[in-house]
Image: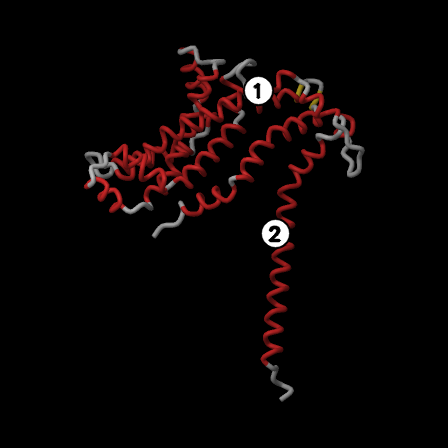
Amino acid sequence: MEGHRTLQQIQRGIRTRRILKLTVMTVIIYTIAIVYFSPILYMFLTGFKTEHQAVLPRLFFTPTFETFQRVVGDPTMFRFIRNSAYQVFFGTLLSLLLGIPAAFGLVFGRLRKDTTNGNIYLWFITTILLPPVAVIIPLYTWFQQFNLINTPYGLLVAYVGFHTPIVVWMVHSFFSDLPVEIFEASEIDGCSRLQQLIFIAVPLVRTGIMSAALLVAVFIWNEFFLGFNLTGNPTATLPVYMARFREQQGMFVAQLSASSTIAVLPAVIFGWMTQKALVKGLTLGAVKG
């Protein structure tokens, strides 16, 4: 009958609607991605302009390496990069060394009261929400009293204190997913708590540890407020150096864009190389059961 469609027509209509839906979703996703990526693209392109070209933005321009040469040619810039690398490496390492045993103890350790573990974990979570500006005055006073101002290890202490709770928060969820029977069996074999942590727990949650390390490293690399207030010129980090391009005479947009491009390259490259582990770590830790 003409009023009824054949099976092939129905299947063809379903495929057409599916392709149309997929095409629309793809266009929407790419549009959102372009909108979010446009500031980074604009920053990258501005680094290849002169200061005059950057003040008067144009879609078409003659690229030049003059601004990048001026920024890279500044010998002080590499000192700031070295300071940032120092803070990222040791800050991430110490945060992991303190946060992983703390998370393991909160999950599998038992204190005198049953609610103590949950209260301590809640304290770590609330510490993450604490903005650095809320404690900068007592922190500065304490640093000044112990001669930690303008020292690399002083800033390192602040970074470890602010980022260890992030490690505890992320790794805690991974440890909570591990079956208790594994550790009960290891205790029968004579395994101590430290051995359980090193040889059993850490290898099983290495993806989550990698995700936590990447987030902490990126946070420390991009941190500006503590680095600006607790360090001086010899020990300042790269974000503090980039703030110099805004002076009384105005903002050096091209030089700021060039230095910002150099600053974000390590985080972008490292994030691109570890994106699978990062996504897997962030998603697995959120799934229970």
The N terminus - image quarter: bottom right
Q: Earlier in the sequence, mark 2 or mark 1?
A: 2
SS of the residue at dot 1? helix
Q: Is residue 272 left or right of residue 53?
A: left
Q: How many residues crowd mark 1 within 10 Å: few (<14), some (14–19), many (20+)? A: many
Spatial separation of the CA atoms under disc 2 and disc 1: 37 Å
Residue at 65 percent across and 50 percent down: it is 31
Q: Which residue is mark 1?
A: 80
Residue drawn at point x = 68 percent, y = 22 percent: 71
The kind of residue on which mark 1 rests is Phe
Task: Relative to 208, say whether 55 is above or below.
Answer: above
Q: Which mark is residue 29?
A: 2
Mark 2, Cα crowd under 10 Å, few <14 / some 14-19 / many 20+, is: few
Horizontal arrangement in the rendering, residue 278 relative to residue 14 (left or right): left
Q: Position of residue 10 (x, y in %)?
A: 59, 76
Where residue 130 appears, as percent x and y from the top left, is 42, 30
Residue at point 77%, 32% (across, down): 63
Which image quadrant is residue 129 in? top left
User: Would you say the residues marked 2 and 1 are in contact, meaning their CB atoms lie under 8 Å apart?
Assistant: no
Camera-side residue of 204 and 147: 204
Whether residue 33 sits left or right of residue 109 in the image: it is right
Q: Nearer the viewer, residue 137 or 160?
A: 160
Q: Nearer the viewer, residue 270 or 235?
A: 270
Q: What x and y, as percent, mark residue 108?
A: 26, 39
Please identify, in this view, whether the residue under mark 2 or under mark 1 is nearer the observer: 1
